[in-house]
Amino acid sequence: MVLDVTLIAITLIALLIASYSDIRTREVPDWLNYGLIFAAFGVRIIFSFELGWTVLFSGILGFIICLALAFLFYYTGQWGGGDSKLLMAMGVIIGINYSFNADSWNLLFFFLALLFLGAIYGLIYMIVIAIVKRKLFVKDITKRMKKQKKLHSFTLIVSLIFVVLTIFQSFFWPLIILPLGMFYLFSFVNSVEKTCFFKKIKPENLTEGDWLAEDVKVGTKIIVAAKTLEKEDLVKLLPLKNLILIKEGVPFVPSFLFAYLVLIFGREVFDFIIKRLF
């Protein structure tokens, strides 16, 4: 019980600071991520003398699982370095019980909640950004819809087909809104990304973890390929005079806080949301 309270207190403080930093500056300091990892391991080591070595082993097992996931998401370009390191820390904190009881599923539950709540949070964030920059967004989405008239008509026809099928078989009704819904969703997301998430900045203002939107070339030579920037990339880009095009993603760290709060206060809340939505 004392172990759980200690880990929860440390984690909530760290996630609050990390969320604020991510929203404010679009990055999470390395000292915070690494500090959380070492603090979680330190707490588990201390309590392992009293509660047994399984307390430490649980954290190690969770860390290894999340390390693999972090590498996957980072090197496929889905997450930045800060998100990946924070996931490793959450692996140590939540852990996987060696006895493999009901609590052993907590890490999986947290990860699923992270993805689900992250998607909802990301969509809400994009809606807010689209409203704030509505002039740019409306202009682009209008142009996009005109270019995609054929695809729009096709998805409308598919939806109408499902309407007809629903008359004969009621289980088709959930599919009625799927084609049009996916079309509008992808159009919205692509338009928001194009008009609200790309910007040009000076090389000296770049930071580790920024997403390079295109290859940076000097003549025909590629200096840095489009990817998440690392420290050595910043050294290469700093002498350049031209502005660098980067892509700003949704600050994802608050999703970690939301998912952890759901984990703490019980799965009933998450189940309630799922049932209401579906």
Image (cartoon, rainbow, N blue to C red):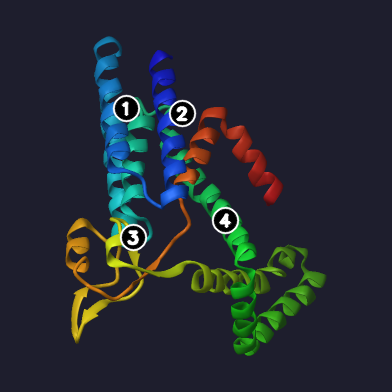
Q: Are marks 4 and 3 in contact (CB under 8 Å)?
A: no
- First reached walking from the N terminus: tag 2 or tag 4: 2
> What distance separates the C-alpha of mark 4 from that of mark 3?
19 Å
Residue 75 lies, in percent from the top left, at: 28, 60
Of badges 3 and 2, the one in the foreground is 3
Amino acid under label 2? Ala
Q: Which residue type carries mark 3? A: Asp
Point out residue 50 in the picture as x, y percentages from the top left corner: 28, 10
- Mark 4 vs mark 1: which is more N-terminal? 1
Task: Kindly state the secondary structure of the residue where label 2 is placed.
Answer: helix
Q: CA distance from mark 3 to mark 1?
A: 38 Å
Question: Image check: 66 left or right of 18?
Answer: left
Dot 3 falls on a residue whose secondary structure is loop
In this view, 232 is above or below 95? below
Q: Residue at x 32, y 27 (%)?
A: 98
Q: Which mark is residue 223?
A: none
Residue 228, above or below 240: above
- Find disc 1 in the rendering and name its residue: 98
| Residue under the point 35% across and 64% down | 211
Q: Residues within 10 Å of mark 4 (few under 14, many from 20)?
A: some
Q: Which mark is residue 125?
A: 4
- Which of these two is toward me, 223 or 154? 223
- Identity of the residue furthest to the front in this view: 241
Residue 102's tag is 2
In the image, taking residue 41 as reference, residue 144 lies left or right, namely: right
Disc 4 versus disc 1: nearer the observer: 4
Residue located beneath label 3 in the image? 210
